[in-house]
Amino acid sequence: MDFQPKSFTATMKMSAGEIERRVLDMCDIEKRRIGQDLHDSIGQQLTGISLISKALEQRMREAHYPEADSLKELAEIVDQTIDQIRNVVSGLAPSEIQSRNAETALETLCERIEQIHHIRCTFNYEICDLIEDPDTVKNLYFVATEAINNAIRHGEADQIDVHLRQGTDTHLGELMIRNNGCCDIIDFSNSTRIGLDSMRFRAEALNGQLDIERHPDRCVSVICSFQIPSASQQD
């Protein structure tokens, strides 16, 4: 008797693009879950430790104990750790891609990067219509996030320019993330291998591709071409 599990049969009927989108959706759901767990468990516990440390510090300072300064340092370290966890959570489960268009989501991302890393991160939107398809917004956002983080972490960039512009065809768009990092393009590719694979996977899910270019001024650009969703797809 020839037996095939229903799930296997259903998968065989799916196109390669549908499988890619399903995998990305599952990854993003897991990211959100991890981010929520970090916020609800570790984040809340650290907040409790911070409050207790500050209360003890106040009591010891009123009693003129010299150890009060050590408790103050402990509370400051805990607060810094809480801020770091918030930054991680905002990357795993960013609120800016919820019910947002691509322009607003990417603009908010650049503003957050400037606040967190204290570098210049500009954004330019050069497409006539708004891109509101949730999957397109999500994938463009995570491509930009990965490219920006790689530029800062591996290239030590302090100037990043994000452009969302029209492509060579009216139905095509380009997301370009240009940085002034010091990393050679080959070293950049090698040091960011996992991130590049993730960005390429998302570019393919957008019916596009990912390219890396080195400019004469030694700046590096990550360029994600993609198909702009039609009006019916965004309804």
Image (cartoon, rainbow, N blue to C red):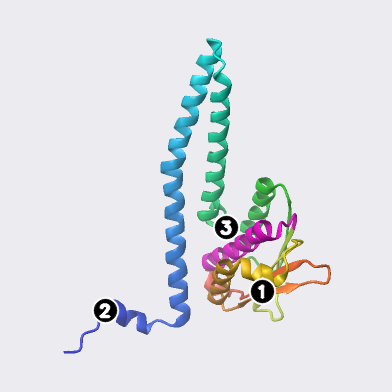
Among all residues in the image, which is located at the extreme front?
66
Q: Secondary structure at mark 1?
A: strand
Q: What is the C-alpha distance between the residues marked 3 and 1?
A: 18 Å
Mark 3 belongs to which amino acid?
Arg
Question: CA–CA distance between discs 1 and 2?
Answer: 38 Å
- Identify the residue position indicated by label 1 in the image: 173
In the depicted view, which residue is nearer to us: 196 or 163?
196
Q: Is residue 39 above or below residue 109?
A: above
The Cα–Cα distance between marks 3 and 2, rounded to whole angstroms, is 36 Å
Q: Nearer the viewer, residue 136 or 186?
A: 186
Rendered image quadrant of residue 208: bottom right
Span colored in magenta: 133-159
In screen coordinates, is 203 left or right of 219?
left
The N terminus lies in quadrant: bottom left
Which residue is outermost to the top?
63
Find residue 177 and report its horizontal and vertical position in percent: 70, 65
User: SS at mark 3?
Assistant: loop
Neighbour tally class for label 2: few under 14, some 14-19, many 20 plus, Cα within 10 Å: few
Residue at which label 2 appears: 6
**Local crowd at mark 1 within 10 Å, few (<14), some, or many (≥20)?**
many
What residue is pinned by disc 3?
100
Q: Which mark is residue 210?
A: none
Residue 66 in sight here:
yes
Q: Please state the horizontal and vertical placement of residue 44, each as a whole percent of the image.
A: 44, 37
- Residue 180, horizontal then vertical, whole percent: 77, 61
